[in-house]
Image (cartoon, rainbow, N blue to C red):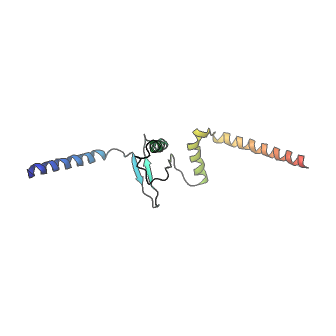
Amino acid sequence: MDDDENLDIESSIRKETAAIDGTKGKPQLFSPVRLDIECVLFVKVRPPIDPVDFVHRICKEVVSKPDTAGTKYINRLTPMTLMGKATEKGLEEVAKAVLGEHFGLIRNDETEEVTKTQNDADEDRLKRQAHSVS
């Protein structure tokens, strides 16, 4: 009887190791990002998972099933669709890429032209106000 049990244990271990070896070649959809920040966890997701849609689905599930949701210790979920350098140029590039589709942003050359036109209009308005006051 002990030999039969050992064979069952051995075969189950072989199956487990085979399953682990089979997943090594596959890319992980979720991978933790280790940072030395207390109480903050970053998780990197790979396509086909969209971070915004993923967070939205979690929030909908919590609202629909508040008793069964496993989010007791989560205070905030913030999806990040793109990361860039913490510079003015980096922020501008990320903002254009991420917010462009939502706010209908225009290209750089058109933005400069619109800004010049707005500045000229502001100067004209200020001149008219100055003339009307005097």
The part of the image, by quadrant, that contains residue 105 is: top right
Q: Residue furthest right?
A: 134
Residue depicted at x 57% and y 51%: 90
Does 50 sit left or right of 110 as displayed? left
The number of callouts visible is 0
Q: Is 75 or 109 nearer to us in this picture?
A: 75
Q: Position of residue 45 (x, y in %)?
A: 43, 46
101 over 16 or under it: above or below: above
Residue depicted at x 17% and y 47%: 11
Q: Position of residue 73 (x, y in %)?
A: 44, 54
Q: Position of residue 37 (x, y in %)?
A: 47, 60
Q: Is 32 or 86 nearer to us in this picture?
A: 32
Does 113 sit left or right of 6 as displayed? right
Q: Position of residue 113 (x, y in %)?
A: 71, 41
Q: Is 107 or 18 nearer to us in this picture?
A: 18
Q: Residue furthest front?
A: 67
Residue depicted at x 12% and y 50%: 5
Residue depicted at x 67% and y 42%: 111
